[in-house]
Structure formats: C-alpha cells, structure tokens
Amino acid sequence: MHAREAARLLLALAAGVAIGWTLSTTAPAPRVVATPAPDAAPTGADLAQFRQFLADLLPGNEPRRADEPPDYSPEVVMYDQPRLMDEAFAHLVRHTPGKTDLYLVAFGGDGDEDVFRNEVEYAETLFSQRFGAKGRTLVLENNPATVGTRPLATWTNLEDALERLTTRVMDPEEDILVLFMTSHGSEEHDLYVGMGTLPLDPINAEDLADILAAHPVRWKVVIVSACYSGGFVAPLKNATTMVVTAARADRTSFGCGADSDITYFGKAFFAHGLNETDSFRGAFDVATRLVAEWEAEHDDAKASEPQIASTPLIEAKLASWRKDLKLGAPVPFAPAAKPDGEAQSRARSRNQ
C-alpha cells in the first residue's frame, strides 16, 4: 500500500483505545494522536469521538462541539483551493537577483484548535516585520475562520506551494526556505492534518522528506512543532538543512488545547527566542531553557527536550544572510484576530 494511503488509516480511533489510558490532569495537555486498529476506516465520527474523549480527559482541551454542523461546505472549501492558492501566490515577491532572500511557508495542520492558527499567523507577522520577509510568506492553515481566505494546510497544497515557489518565485540554489509545521503528532511520527468533518491525509516524517526531495531547495530550515517531532530529524537533515523540533522522538510537547493561545515551544522559540536573537540557533538555545523551566513547574511532566540538527554549511549560509539583514524591532505575540463573518461567506454559502 502506498504510504499516503496507509497513513490515512491512522486517522481513525476505536472507542476501546481509550480504555486503560492514564494521563495527569495537572500537566499541560500533550498533543496526542492515537493509532487505530489496522482494519479501521477513517470517519468523521471516529475523529469526533476521539476529540470528545480528549475534552473529557484533559482540562483545557475542549474541541468545537462535534454535534454541531460545520459553518462551511467541505465541498466548496476543497474546490476553492486553486483560487486561494492563486491569490496567495499573486502577493508573493520574486527573488532579488544577487541577494539571498528568505521565504517562509507556515503549515497549521489541526483546524479544531485555534492555537495552531495563532502560531502560523504569528510566524508570518514575525518574519515579515522582523526578518525582512514581507511579501515572502505563505500560510497554509486549517481553521473554520479562514476557509474562505487562506489555502488549507494539506499534503496537496504543500506540494503545490513548493512547486510554485521553486519554479516561479525563489532561486532554489540561492534563497533560504523556512518551513514551519505545527500540529498534533503521534508516536509513529505522523502529523495530524484535518478539520472537523474534513479529515485530510496526515504527513509523516518520511512523507515530508519525500515532498522536500521532490521540490528541491538547497538551503532550508525546517521547524516541526508537535509531540514526538524529534522523529523528523533523521529523515530531514542533510548538509544544507537545519532541523528544529519541539520534542524528542519519544517525548510529548505541551501547551495546546482550547485554552491555549500558543504552545510552549511556539512561545519559547518564536515569541521569545526570535525576538531576543537574530539567529535560529540562538532562538533554539532560548527555547530549550524556557521550555525546561515551564515544564519543571509541573512535577509529573516528562521533559520534552527540543532537538536541533545543523551543519557548518547551513550555519555559514544563515550567517551570510544575516549580514545583509536589516533586523526589525521585536514583534509581541498576539492571537489571530477573530473573523468578522464576511471572510467565510463564500465557503459556507452551500450550507445556508
């Protein structure tokens, strides 16, 4: 079975999986994706049942009401993706000849918790205002508030984005790609991708490595914020790629849930680290210290231990880029703005 087809099976969750689970209610809610029985078929009901289980078990992790219909038409949303991708790319600025430009692609995979939307949109603002990437940022996100204005974070859109970037916008040999992916993660190193009744294909570590290999950019910084995200390091690292993850391959990370505006790692790395320093290495050092401090406040929380893999080549490239960078002022974190209703009108029109 193709890896992408096999991965879809991981979206289902039988009710019996919940039996025997024990999680502390005092520690921050970890991001968890459970593994279904091999013959299970993914359904919206399975996902809703899983999210309701988390809501009952983990304080502050309440999802949107599973029994309420979505305020959008899944069919309209999916058919609208080419238009949204065209509009997003129409605003991108092309490579500057003779200069190294930095491009950000931010991917918010879980559309049922606003924390992931907050992170990718904050990353967009931070890189635009502080790191000279205005006009060179692309956000793919799953969130009911933005289905009519932002492309979805999907496997297909990620491939499309990289194809367009490398053939029409970037200089793939000169420019730097920062790929930031945030969602729930599983022990099998799968990133959850979905939104309510719109389940989408998950992306695992090998999948992401294959996607990047098929759309080559020489210089990359890949940041994965999820439980067990350390499992992405080995498949993604190479001589010209820096990989940063929120946790070890066998550890959870913390700070998601309906009551959270930003994850521990997102707050530490982006809101603190990249505002206190001008380098990804420096931001990582800040983040590891802060995350350890915050986790230490919970006696029963097992340390997530963020990971980094780098090389002299990518470090030298980033240092060269920083020499020409006119660093902007720090950008305080703020959650994404709530929609005014007009932005979703096209996507939800079929439901009215």
Image: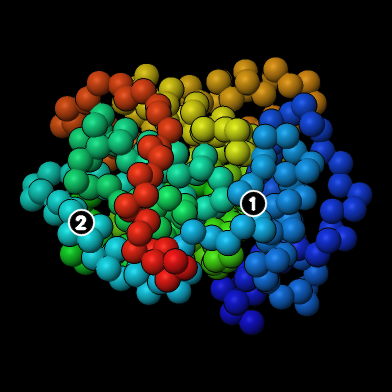
Q: Residue at x 22, y 40 (%)?
A: 133
User: In whole angstroms, how far apart are the C-alphas of marks 1 and 2?
Assistant: 41 Å
Q: Which amino acid does label 1 sit on?
A: Arg
What numbered label is drawn on residue 65?
1
Residue 36 spot, x, y in % from top left: 77, 65
What is the crowding at mark 2: few (fewer than 14 residues within 10 Å), some, or many (at least 20)? many
Q: Is mark 1 on a helix, strand or loop?
A: loop
In the foreground, 231 or 32: 32
The image quarter in which residue 205 lies: bottom right
On screen, residue 38 versus residue 223, left or right, reads: right
Q: Which residue is drawn at 47% across and 52% down?
A: 143
The image quarter in which residue 99 lies: top left
Which colour scheme appears in the figure?
rainbow
The image quarter in which residue 127 lies: top left
Q: Is residue 77 in view from this perspective?
A: no
Give the quadrant of the C terminus.
bottom left
In the foreground, 143 or 179: 143
Residue 52 spot, x, y in % from top left: 73, 51
What numbered label is drawn on residue 152?
none
Residue 98 spot, x, y in % from top left: 8, 47
What numbered label is drawn on residue 170?
2
160 versus 64 height, above or below: below
